[in-house]
Amino acid sequence: MITALANPQRFMALSRSLLPWLAGLAVALFAIGLPWSLFIAPPDYQQGDAARIMFVHVPAAWMSMAVYMTMAAAAISFLVWGHVVADVAVKTAAPLGAAFTAIALITGSLWGQPMWGTWWVWDARLTSVLVLFFLYLGAMALRGAMDDETKAGKACAILVLVGVINIPIIKFSVDWWNTLHQPASVFRAGGPAIDPSLLWPLLVMALAFTIAFAAMLVVGMRGEILRRRVIALEMRRARG
Amino acid sequence: MSLLHALLAIVLRDAKLGWVGGGGAALPAAFFAGASALAPFALGPDPQLLTKIGPGFLWLALALSALVSLERLFQGDLEDGTLDQLALSGIPLTLVVAAKVLGQWLAAGAPLVIISPILALLLQIPPHAIPALMLNLALGGLGLFFIGSIPAALAAGVRRGGLLAALLALPLYAPPVIFGAAAASAAASLGDFGGQPFLLLCAFTLAALATAPPAAAAGLRLHLS
Amino acid sequence: MTASVSLKDVSLQRGNRLLFEGLSFDAKEGEAVELRGANGSGKSSLLRAIVGLLPIASGAITLSPRSVDDDRLPTAYLGHLDAVKNGETVSAQLQFWATVSGTPGANIAEALDRLGIGGLANLPSSMLSAGQKRRLALARLLVAPQPIWLLDEPAAPLDANGRDVLAGLIASHRRAGGIVIAAIHDPLPGGASQTVDLSALP
């Protein structure tokens, strides 16, 4: 399947037929998930309705990691086999991943405010996500720094892979740092003992986020492939 | 044997050129000193507070000094054709990178270690902790320089590449700063040397020494083509 | 083993731009090849591709002699840039390149003399003129000898005397069985065996 998608023409054809389904499914999932999370699911016995932000925060945090893993897989595909579609995927996914990470950070902050009275807390998970945000920004900055598309793509791919290897190290060091400095509170979000009445809407929202990401990624990739085709046509016209 | 000879030549040359030219060794040392000296301005002169925060602030200054020196690692050699010749010399580019980073550490990292005793006293770090602190800064600096060589290589020759390299290096610096500052604090306040944070710092530096040169070499090859 | 260079149907790309395609030529020992072409036609890129810095888009480049144990190509490259650092003396620089290239015992003084800059040996490189820096770069060819020379505008900053020196270097290299491939606007000092014009390609 990977090699089938690697061909730009086949990707364009496949994505064209797939896109309406992805978009429709995403809308449907949000239509189910949002009311369920915001109104139907019971409020948290400690935090009340404020905890409902968890239904956006947790999926966003999951996505920020999942998108980075997707970028890493695409980066390998580009560096090892030279699949241009993979490079397009990395370029398109980076700002999307950064957006998910920002949403996770902002919702984390908004959640923290009513609970602890501060707008930010250096909890291990939030801190790791903050560092991940910088990894995304770096990838976007590097991608845009060079005029040569292939060179920029390869440099960004190398950076993404270096980042992926460092993520466990960063996570470990931040966790270690957090226990060293003994924070006042612990984030209970999405723990293993979550009640089914909260788990199901959470999963629906997570799926909604994932499908929405897939749809946005496909839209972005199609746009980028078309942009490159236009450039190639213009260059051929200038020479001929 | 001649490979070792060649690598040593690269280390010594980069160290000499960094130590002698453009402000020489004094410049990174002065920057480190100045950045450390900002601590009391930022936090107040209370000695007890400085003892508590001093080691961490020293590490912050170390990280900043390392970030500032990233630009000079490959940019100059890329611009004057030296990197072309080194890549064609028959020495694997990975080893060339490792030698260059080592040379740069000797020129820009070692001076920081040398003046650190003075700064330790300024920041109210107890004198008995100074040898441990120097070792900590030496190993930590080595780790920072090696892991920083990856962004330096990826951003070499790019507009405002120095700033870009610094941005890319920031997330990668989080683990060594965490371990190094904790180890420095442990040495300063508890007299604890060789504890867990120090060992973690050593582990990080060793990992960086082993994994950064190939990644940086891959990045450099992009810019050579 | 004798030196030879063979290019078959080589095409070269720079970023998104195709520089040229279908380039083929051969050079045997003792020959000199002039690379000609308009600015931007790909002369410099072709030289970089032959030494292995730039990957080729298609075709094959075969160089000989190749040793079995290491991947090093039998080429010496002189680009636009001289790779001369300001902080070192002239002879220290040359000694560095000799050591790095695996010939630490090379005769530095003799190489500098042949290039006419023997008297500058102990001066800091910052005091050299552009032509003298070029001669220092050319001296590298002598202390790190390779059968195939790839030269990019070697004569550009040189004066008339410098060009004579260059012609002498090329001539003795060819006599010893070496090959010279040079991208050059003016005629190659000492004459060329063949001329390859990149502008003539599609």
Image (spheres, coloured by chain):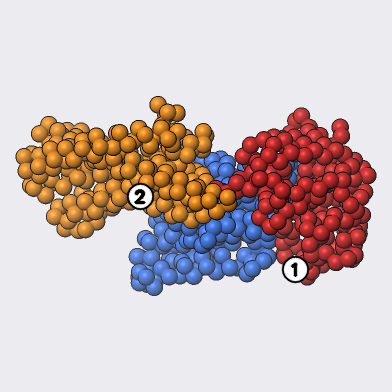
Quote the CA–CA distance across marks 2 and 1: 46 Å
Colour assigned to chain B in the rendering is blue
Q: On screen, C153 above or below A232? A: below
Name the quarter where the N terminus of chain A is drawn: top left
* Numbered mark located on residue C126 in the image: 1
Q: Horizontally, is A165 left or right of C49 in the view?
A: left
Residue A134 pos. (x, y %): 38, 52
Q: Position of residue A174 (x, y in %)?
A: 35, 46
Q: Nearer the viewer, mark 2 or mark 1?
A: 2
Q: Quadrant of residue B22?
A: bottom right
Which amino acid type is marked by label 2? Pro
Which chain is depicted red?
C
In the rendered view, would you say A187 is above or below B111?
above
Mark 2, other Cα within 10 Å: few <14 / some 14–19 / many ≥20 = some
Q: In what element is the residue under mark 1?
A: helix
What hue does chain A carry in this figure?
Answer: orange
The answer to whether residue C68 is left or right of residue A79 is right
Residue under disc 2 on the same chain as residue under disc 1: no
Name the one closer to the observer, A27 or C20.
C20
Residue C151, above or below A196: below
Kindly identify which residue carries mark 2.
A95
* Rendering quarter of residue C161: bottom right
Query: From this viewpoint, is residue B86 visible?
Result: no
Is residue A198 among what the camera can see? yes
Looking at the picture, which amino acid does disc 1 mark?
Ser
The residue at the far top in this view is A1
Q: Residue at x 52, y 46 (%)?
A: A150
Mark 2: secondary structure: helix
Question: Residue A124 at what x, y percent from top left?
Answer: 30, 47
